[in-house]
Amino acid sequence: MPEGDTIFRAARTLNRALAGQTITKFETVFPKLARVDFDEGIRGRTVELVEAKGKWILMHFSGGRILLTHLLMNGSWHIYRPGEKWRLPRSSMRVMIATETIVAVAFNIPIAEFHPQDSLRRRSGFASLGPSLLAHGFDVNEGVERLLEHRDLEVGEALLKQSMVAGIGNVFKSEVCHACGVYPFRKVATLTQREATELMSVAQKFLCANVNEMSGNQIFTYTGPRRTTSRSNPEQRLWVYKRRGEPCRRCGTPIESWKQGLDARTTFWCPQCQRG
Protein backbone atom coordinates (compact mmCIF):
# COMPACT_ATOMS: atom_id res chain seq x y z
CA MET A 1 0.00 0.00 0.00
CA PRO A 2 1.41 3.46 -0.86
CA GLU A 3 2.56 5.39 2.18
CA GLY A 4 2.01 9.00 3.14
CA ASP A 5 4.91 10.38 1.15
CA THR A 6 3.74 8.70 -2.07
CA ILE A 7 0.19 9.97 -1.62
CA PHE A 8 1.44 13.47 -0.82
CA ARG A 9 3.49 13.57 -4.03
CA ALA A 10 0.55 12.23 -6.07
CA ALA A 11 -1.77 14.90 -4.68
CA ARG A 12 0.80 17.63 -5.27
CA THR A 13 1.22 16.51 -8.89
CA LEU A 14 -2.55 16.44 -9.44
CA ASN A 15 -2.94 19.85 -7.85
CA ARG A 16 -0.19 21.33 -9.98
CA ALA A 17 -1.79 19.86 -13.09
CA LEU A 18 -5.48 20.55 -12.40
CA ALA A 19 -5.96 23.40 -9.93
CA GLY A 20 -7.82 26.31 -11.47
CA GLN A 21 -8.86 24.36 -14.56
CA THR A 22 -12.38 23.66 -15.75
CA ILE A 23 -13.55 20.07 -16.19
CA THR A 24 -14.48 19.34 -19.80
CA LYS A 25 -15.05 15.60 -19.48
CA PHE A 26 -15.77 13.18 -16.63
CA GLU A 27 -16.01 9.39 -16.88
CA THR A 28 -16.27 6.68 -14.25
CA VAL A 29 -17.18 3.03 -13.86
CA PHE A 30 -18.62 3.66 -10.37
CA PRO A 31 -22.42 4.01 -10.56
CA LYS A 32 -22.64 6.34 -7.55
CA LEU A 33 -20.13 8.75 -9.05
CA ALA A 34 -21.86 8.61 -12.41
CA ARG A 35 -25.17 9.41 -10.70
CA VAL A 36 -23.72 12.52 -9.09
CA ASP A 37 -22.37 13.61 -12.47
CA PHE A 38 -25.77 12.99 -14.08
CA ASP A 39 -27.75 14.80 -11.36
CA GLU A 40 -25.43 17.68 -10.56
CA GLY A 41 -22.91 17.88 -13.39
CA ILE A 42 -19.17 17.57 -12.81
CA ARG A 43 -18.40 18.96 -16.24
CA GLY A 44 -18.09 22.72 -16.10
CA ARG A 45 -16.88 22.78 -12.51
CA THR A 46 -13.43 24.03 -11.57
CA VAL A 47 -10.85 22.02 -9.68
CA GLU A 48 -10.05 24.25 -6.71
CA LEU A 49 -7.53 22.13 -4.83
CA VAL A 50 -6.09 18.62 -4.65
CA GLU A 51 -4.60 17.65 -1.30
CA ALA A 52 -3.51 14.60 0.68
CA LYS A 53 -4.58 13.66 4.17
CA GLY A 54 -2.74 10.60 5.38
CA LYS A 55 -3.26 8.01 2.65
CA TRP A 56 -6.35 9.71 1.16
CA ILE A 57 -6.49 12.12 -1.78
CA LEU A 58 -9.13 14.85 -1.80
CA MET A 59 -10.02 16.68 -5.01
CA HIS A 60 -12.09 19.80 -4.27
CA PHE A 61 -14.46 21.04 -6.98
CA SER A 62 -16.32 24.33 -7.21
CA GLY A 63 -19.80 24.05 -5.80
CA GLY A 64 -18.65 22.17 -2.70
CA ARG A 65 -18.21 18.64 -4.06
CA ILE A 66 -15.12 16.68 -2.97
CA LEU A 67 -13.84 13.54 -4.71
CA LEU A 68 -12.32 11.28 -2.06
CA THR A 69 -10.06 8.46 -3.28
CA HIS A 70 -7.91 5.80 -1.66
CA LEU A 71 -5.41 3.77 -3.67
CA LEU A 72 -5.09 0.81 -1.27
CA MET A 73 -2.67 -1.75 -2.75
CA ASN A 74 -2.96 -1.39 -6.53
CA GLY A 75 -4.51 1.98 -7.33
CA SER A 76 -2.73 4.88 -9.02
CA TRP A 77 -3.38 8.29 -10.54
CA HIS A 78 -1.77 9.11 -13.91
CA ILE A 79 -1.41 12.45 -15.67
CA TYR A 80 -1.50 12.68 -19.48
CA ARG A 81 -1.73 15.30 -22.19
CA PRO A 82 -4.81 15.06 -24.43
CA GLY A 83 -4.24 12.35 -27.03
CA GLU A 84 -1.30 10.80 -25.19
CA LYS A 85 -1.40 7.00 -24.94
CA TRP A 86 -2.25 5.64 -21.51
CA ARG A 87 0.28 3.36 -19.87
CA LEU A 88 -2.45 1.04 -18.58
CA PRO A 89 -5.44 -0.43 -20.46
CA ARG A 90 -8.76 1.38 -20.48
CA SER A 91 -10.28 -1.60 -18.67
CA SER A 92 -8.27 -0.53 -15.61
CA MET A 93 -9.71 3.00 -15.67
CA ARG A 94 -11.99 3.82 -12.74
CA VAL A 95 -12.21 7.63 -12.96
CA MET A 96 -11.15 10.00 -15.73
CA ILE A 97 -11.11 13.78 -15.36
CA ALA A 98 -10.16 15.91 -18.36
CA THR A 99 -9.56 19.61 -18.95
CA GLU A 100 -8.45 21.32 -22.15
CA THR A 101 -4.80 20.60 -21.36
CA ILE A 102 -4.70 17.66 -18.90
CA VAL A 103 -6.21 14.19 -18.57
CA ALA A 104 -6.07 12.69 -15.06
CA VAL A 105 -6.87 8.98 -14.86
CA ALA A 106 -7.37 6.88 -11.73
CA PHE A 107 -6.50 3.25 -12.46
CA ASN A 108 -7.61 0.32 -10.30
CA ILE A 109 -8.62 2.46 -7.34
CA PRO A 110 -11.12 0.58 -5.14
CA ILE A 111 -12.47 3.63 -3.29
CA ALA A 112 -13.80 6.76 -4.99
CA GLU A 113 -16.64 8.78 -3.49
CA PHE A 114 -18.18 12.21 -3.86
CA HIS A 115 -18.82 14.04 -0.60
CA PRO A 116 -20.00 17.41 0.58
CA GLN A 117 -17.95 18.70 3.50
CA ASP A 118 -20.46 17.57 6.12
CA SER A 119 -20.54 13.90 5.10
CA LEU A 120 -16.76 13.83 4.72
CA ARG A 121 -16.43 14.62 8.41
CA ARG A 122 -18.45 11.50 9.20
CA ARG A 123 -16.83 9.14 6.68
CA SER A 124 -15.54 6.02 8.43
CA GLY A 125 -11.78 5.64 8.16
CA PHE A 126 -11.34 9.28 7.18
CA ALA A 127 -13.05 11.11 10.02
CA SER A 128 -10.87 9.30 12.57
CA LEU A 129 -7.54 10.25 10.95
CA GLY A 130 -4.91 11.62 13.28
CA PRO A 131 -2.76 14.62 12.39
CA SER A 132 -0.70 14.16 9.24
CA LEU A 133 3.05 13.97 9.67
CA LEU A 134 3.35 15.93 6.42
CA ALA A 135 0.97 18.70 7.44
CA HIS A 136 2.42 22.16 7.86
CA GLY A 137 2.88 22.76 11.56
CA PHE A 138 2.68 19.12 12.64
CA ASP A 139 3.06 19.06 16.43
CA VAL A 140 5.57 16.38 17.48
CA ASN A 141 4.44 16.66 21.11
CA GLU A 142 0.84 15.89 20.10
CA GLY A 143 2.11 12.89 18.15
CA VAL A 144 3.99 11.69 21.22
CA GLU A 145 0.89 12.00 23.40
CA ARG A 146 -1.17 10.06 20.87
CA LEU A 147 1.48 7.33 20.62
CA LEU A 148 1.73 6.88 24.38
CA GLU A 149 -2.05 6.48 24.64
CA HIS A 150 -1.72 3.09 22.88
CA ARG A 151 0.04 1.49 25.84
CA ASP A 152 -1.04 -2.08 25.13
CA LEU A 153 0.04 -2.17 21.49
CA GLU A 154 3.44 -3.12 20.19
CA VAL A 155 5.37 -0.12 18.87
CA GLY A 156 5.31 -1.33 15.27
CA GLU A 157 1.53 -1.82 15.41
CA ALA A 158 0.94 1.58 16.98
CA LEU A 159 2.95 3.41 14.34
CA LEU A 160 0.67 2.00 11.63
CA LYS A 161 -2.51 3.30 13.27
CA GLN A 162 -3.68 6.16 11.06
CA SER A 163 -5.94 7.36 13.89
CA MET A 164 -2.80 8.13 15.88
CA VAL A 165 -0.82 10.01 13.24
CA ALA A 166 -1.44 9.70 9.51
CA GLY A 167 1.12 8.74 6.90
CA ILE A 168 3.29 5.95 8.30
CA GLY A 169 3.17 2.70 6.37
CA ASN A 170 5.01 -0.59 6.60
CA VAL A 171 8.28 0.70 5.14
CA PHE A 172 8.56 3.70 7.43
CA LYS A 173 7.45 1.64 10.45
CA SER A 174 10.53 -0.58 10.17
CA GLU A 175 12.87 2.22 9.11
CA VAL A 176 11.85 4.58 11.92
CA CYS A 177 12.19 1.91 14.61
CA HIS A 178 15.66 0.99 13.35
CA ALA A 179 16.83 4.59 13.15
CA CYS A 180 15.72 5.09 16.76
CA GLY A 181 17.16 1.81 18.01
CA VAL A 182 13.73 0.67 19.21
CA TYR A 183 12.72 -3.00 19.12
CA PRO A 184 9.40 -2.87 17.18
CA PHE A 185 7.79 -5.67 19.23
CA ARG A 186 8.09 -3.78 22.52
CA LYS A 187 4.89 -2.55 24.13
CA VAL A 188 4.30 1.18 23.84
CA ALA A 189 3.99 1.24 27.64
CA THR A 190 7.73 0.48 27.89
CA LEU A 191 8.79 3.53 25.88
CA THR A 192 10.42 6.43 27.64
CA GLN A 193 9.35 9.97 26.82
CA ARG A 194 12.65 10.46 25.00
CA GLU A 195 12.15 7.34 22.88
CA ALA A 196 8.58 8.30 21.98
CA THR A 197 9.71 11.81 21.03
CA GLU A 198 12.51 10.44 18.87
CA LEU A 199 10.12 8.05 17.08
CA MET A 200 7.76 10.89 16.17
CA SER A 201 10.57 13.28 15.22
CA VAL A 202 12.31 10.73 13.00
CA ALA A 203 9.02 9.67 11.39
CA GLN A 204 8.30 13.29 10.47
CA LYS A 205 11.87 13.77 9.24
CA PHE A 206 11.81 10.67 7.03
CA LEU A 207 8.44 11.45 5.44
CA CYS A 208 9.29 15.10 4.82
CA ALA A 209 12.63 14.15 3.25
CA ASN A 210 10.78 11.95 0.77
CA VAL A 211 8.43 14.64 -0.52
CA ASN A 212 11.11 17.21 -1.33
CA GLU A 213 11.26 17.90 -5.03
CA MET A 214 13.23 20.11 -7.38
CA SER A 215 10.95 20.25 -10.38
CA GLY A 216 10.21 23.96 -10.04
CA ASN A 217 6.93 24.77 -11.75
CA GLN A 218 6.80 21.59 -13.81
CA ILE A 219 3.94 19.17 -13.32
CA PHE A 220 5.92 16.07 -12.51
CA THR A 221 7.37 15.92 -9.02
CA TYR A 222 8.64 12.34 -8.62
CA THR A 223 12.24 12.34 -7.41
CA GLY A 224 13.20 8.67 -7.29
CA PRO A 225 12.98 5.72 -4.91
CA ARG A 226 12.18 6.22 -1.24
CA ARG A 227 15.25 6.88 0.89
CA THR A 228 15.83 6.86 4.65
CA THR A 229 19.63 6.66 4.75
CA SER A 230 21.90 9.51 3.70
CA ARG A 231 23.95 7.27 1.42
CA SER A 232 24.34 8.18 -2.25
CA ASN A 233 24.43 4.58 -3.48
CA PRO A 234 20.85 3.72 -4.57
CA GLU A 235 21.40 0.15 -3.37
CA GLN A 236 21.90 1.49 0.15
CA ARG A 237 18.86 3.75 0.38
CA LEU A 238 17.01 1.85 3.16
CA TRP A 239 18.21 0.64 6.54
CA VAL A 240 16.29 -2.61 7.04
CA TYR A 241 13.11 -2.91 4.96
CA LYS A 242 13.10 -6.03 2.76
CA ARG A 243 16.69 -6.78 3.78
CA ARG A 244 16.14 -10.00 5.71
CA GLY A 245 19.40 -11.93 6.02
CA GLU A 246 21.50 -9.02 4.76
CA PRO A 247 23.99 -7.29 7.08
CA CYS A 248 22.84 -4.33 9.13
CA ARG A 249 24.33 -1.14 7.71
CA ARG A 250 25.42 -0.14 11.21
CA CYS A 251 26.73 -3.30 12.91
CA GLY A 252 26.76 -6.04 10.27
CA THR A 253 24.32 -8.34 12.08
CA PRO A 254 21.89 -10.10 9.70
CA ILE A 255 18.53 -8.35 9.49
CA GLU A 256 15.54 -10.35 10.71
CA SER A 257 11.83 -10.12 9.90
CA TRP A 258 8.60 -11.33 11.43
CA LYS A 259 4.86 -10.90 10.91
CA GLN A 260 3.34 -8.41 13.32
CA GLY A 261 -0.15 -7.51 14.43
CA LEU A 262 -3.59 -8.70 13.39
CA ASP A 263 -2.88 -7.77 9.77
CA ALA A 264 0.38 -9.78 9.83
CA ARG A 265 2.43 -6.98 8.27
CA THR A 266 6.10 -7.90 7.97
CA THR A 267 8.45 -5.99 10.25
CA PHE A 268 12.20 -5.84 9.67
CA TRP A 269 14.75 -5.11 12.38
CA CYS A 270 18.35 -5.61 13.52
CA PRO A 271 18.57 -7.88 16.58
CA GLN A 272 21.78 -6.14 17.68
CA CYS A 273 20.88 -2.47 17.19
CA GLN A 274 17.27 -3.01 18.34
CA ARG A 275 17.54 -5.35 21.26
CA GLY A 276 14.30 -6.63 22.73
Image: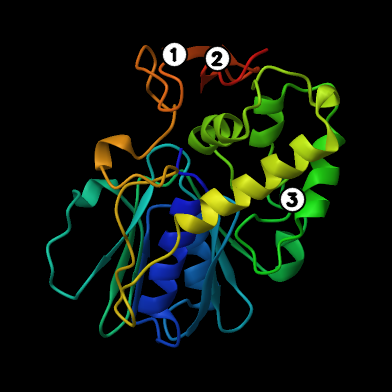
Q: Is label 3 or label 1 in front?
A: 1
Q: Earlier in the sequence, mark 1 or mark 2?
A: 1
Query: Residue 196 shows which numbered tag?
Result: none
Name the residue located 49 percent from the left edge and 78 percent from the top edge. Answer: 41
Residue 183 position, x and y percent, is 65, 20
164 vs 131: above or below: above
Q: Is label 2 or label 3 in front?
A: 2
Query: Residue 272 shows which numbered tag?
Result: 2
Residue underneath mark 1: 253
Residue 115 position, x and y percent, is 64, 64
Q: Amino acid at mark 3?
A: Gly
In the image: residue 62, left or right of residue 254: right
Query: Which structural element holds mark 3?
Result: loop
Q: 146 or 247, which is in the foreground?
A: 247
Residue underneath mark 3: 130
Q: 41 or 50, which is in the foreground?
A: 50
183 vs 106: above or below: above
Q: 93 or 180, which is in the foreground?
A: 180
In what quadrant of the picture does the C terminus appear?
top right
Q: Residues within 10 Å of mark 2 (few under 14, many from 20)?
A: some
